[in-house]
Image: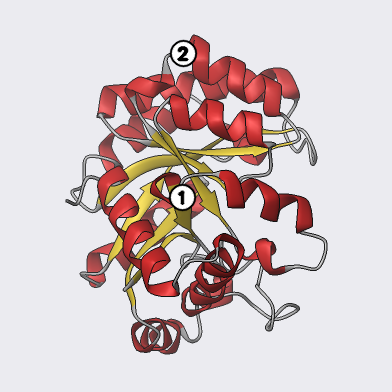
Amino acid sequence: MLIDSHAHLEMPDFRKDLEGVLLRAKDSGIEYIFTVGTEKKDWKRALEIASLYPNIYAILGVHPHNAKEIDEETYPALRKLCQNEKVKAYGEIGLDFYRNHSPRDIQLKRFREQIGLAKELKLPIVVHDREAHQETLEILKSEKAWENGGIIHCFSGDEKMAKTCIDMGFYISIPGSITYKNAGPFHEIVKRLPLESLLVETDAPFLTPVPFRGKRNEPSYVRYTAEKVAEIKKIPFEKVAEVTTENALRVFRLL
């Protein structure tokens, strides 16, 4: 059994063949999928998909790319939607200083606000951090985000950052990019992190693992990420599947 802890099934990439995607996931042993609505136009679709399928849950929030779009209607709408029992986390929220689609000062402000809203909703958070490692850590610490707990999605920091996040009670989520040829430094980090602190994810339709790189990613491919983790850590695939599944069930409070 495996869990895809982060996918975007609500995106148009899956509009035509969602049933086939879900069937392939089931055939590959994917027990649960968490679909992440990152902007206003996607929230209801993510929740609709989660409501239609017993093994799919939703994560809702405002991505740092869209932080500039937050207005007086955003948080009341999220507050209402997130009270649905199929919503298991708040996110993905955080900082993206690589793309800078929203001004940095706005990203910083909205990240703090959304940690607070997640606390109010009593939901763990899913954190997006790209080229903003120090700022992300500073906000997680100053906002006492360990009270939320949650996941550092698509982790891209160093070993020191990973251990700091783990000490705060966060899980480190490993995407399909760990299978890429240039992922050697990331292998060394994963090798030294405790399996009890790791999750696996696809971030579908993005970050497609080898051997399907260049094609659309989908939840069934999370198996290739788990297999790579097993190879790196020199442990059985079944152990990776078992422990990362338990970790996901724990962070999403399904145990």
Q: Closer to the camera: disc 1 or disc 2?
A: 1
Amino acid type at mark 2: Glu
Q: What residue type is labelled 1?
A: Leu
Q: Which of 18 and 160 is in front in this view?
A: 160
- The foreground one among 204 and 79 is 204
Identify the residue position indicated by label 2 in the image.
Answer: 143
Residues 35 and 134: in front is: 134
State the SS at label 2: loop
The quarter of the picture where the N terminus appears is bottom left
Q: In this view, does 109 lie to the left or right of 59?
A: right
Q: How crowded is mark 2: few (under 14 residues within 10 Å), some or many (20 or more)?
A: some
Residue for point 23% across, 53% down: 86
Circle 1 is placed at which residue position?
198
| Image quadrant in which you'd find residue 61 | top left
Residue at x 69% of width, y 21% of height:
134
The residue at the point 56 percent across, 55 percent down is 174
Query: Seen from this angle, which residue lies furthest top?
Result: 142
Percent from the top left, x then y, of residue 213?
72, 77
